[in-house]
Image (cartoon, rainbow, N blue to C red):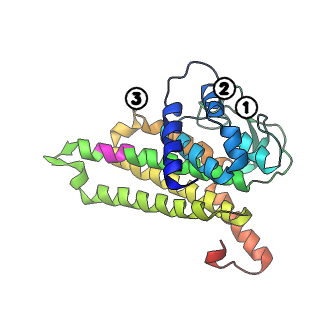
Amino acid sequence: MDDSERELLEETLRKAMTAPADDRRPREAALADLGWPEMLAEEPAAAIRAVFRVLGETGAHAPVLNDVLLHEQGRPPGGTLPMPYAGGLWVRWERDAAVGSAGVDPDLPLRVLPEAGAPVPLALGRQALGWWLLGTGHAMLSLAGRHVLDRHQFGRPLASFQALRHKLAETLVALEGAEATLDQADGDLSSLLAKAAAGRAALIAARHCQQVLGGTGFTAEHELHRHVKRTLTLDGLLGSARELTREAGRLIASRGTAPRLVQL
């Protein structure tokens, strides 16, 4: 899939994810109509990048992380799997959207499991969450960017104040760095590091964009809080940025050698 095809796919996905919801599984059904199972089977890297980034940018959600984990095991999509969560918890992303969330985001149908699940391959799942977190980070940056361009203080647009410009610049740098790691992720360690980088970048975006938006961003009526909650929940899935950084350190220490940057 070349760049023009990916852009067309992302635009189509964006329209589908922002369409009014009129049943209990609208996003999953819309993705199925667009050929999500076939795309995942034929071009998993491109499909994961396009679908999960758009989920982040639009604030929508669907239980398709299950499909990615099942695909990595060579199993057909459509089921659910236990997933590790930060703090030693295990959760299940239910297909039934009515199930309450295990985290701070009540929109996500995550259910805490009473016991740990069996270990499963997580590389593709971490890449998927990395793209989702990256899309969420860009959504927050877009909200903050529009705010500083539209609002004025002391007779000047907020965008003219250097402190705010620095916050937005640091956010953009963090997001672009995470995207570079995701583009190169193709194995267990590189996917682990990419998910950690994306989680860290999205958390930086949440913190800086909240500061830029000020009191407006704290209100329930503003869209930012939904992305902040989504970031906190997604960062914990399949290992938080902090946990994954420590895990990477343990892996490198156990091997007795650190891979070269080009190998990551």
**Residue 144, magenta (yes or no):** yes
| Residue extending farthest right | 118
**Residue 115, magenta (yes or no):** no
| Cβ atoms at labels 1 and 3 below 8 Å apart | no
Name which residue type carries label 1. Glu
> Which residue carries the number 1 mark?
94
Q: Indicate which disc residue 97 carries.
A: 2
* Residue drawn 43% across the image and 39% down it: 224
Between the residue at mark 1 and the residue at mark 3, the CA separation in whole angstroms equals: 28 Å
Q: Indicate which disc residue 221 carries.
A: 3
* Residue drawn 84% across the image and 44% down it: 117
Residue 178 x %, y %: 53, 60
Name which residue type carries label 3. Glu
Looking at the picture, does residue 174 appear above or below residue 228? Answer: below
Label 2: which secondary element: loop
Q: Circle 3: is it few (<14), some (14-19), or many (20+) Cα within 10 Å?
A: few
- Going from the N terminus, do you reach mark 2 or mark 3 first? 2
Name which residue type carries label 2. Ala
Q: Which residues are magenta?
A: 143-147
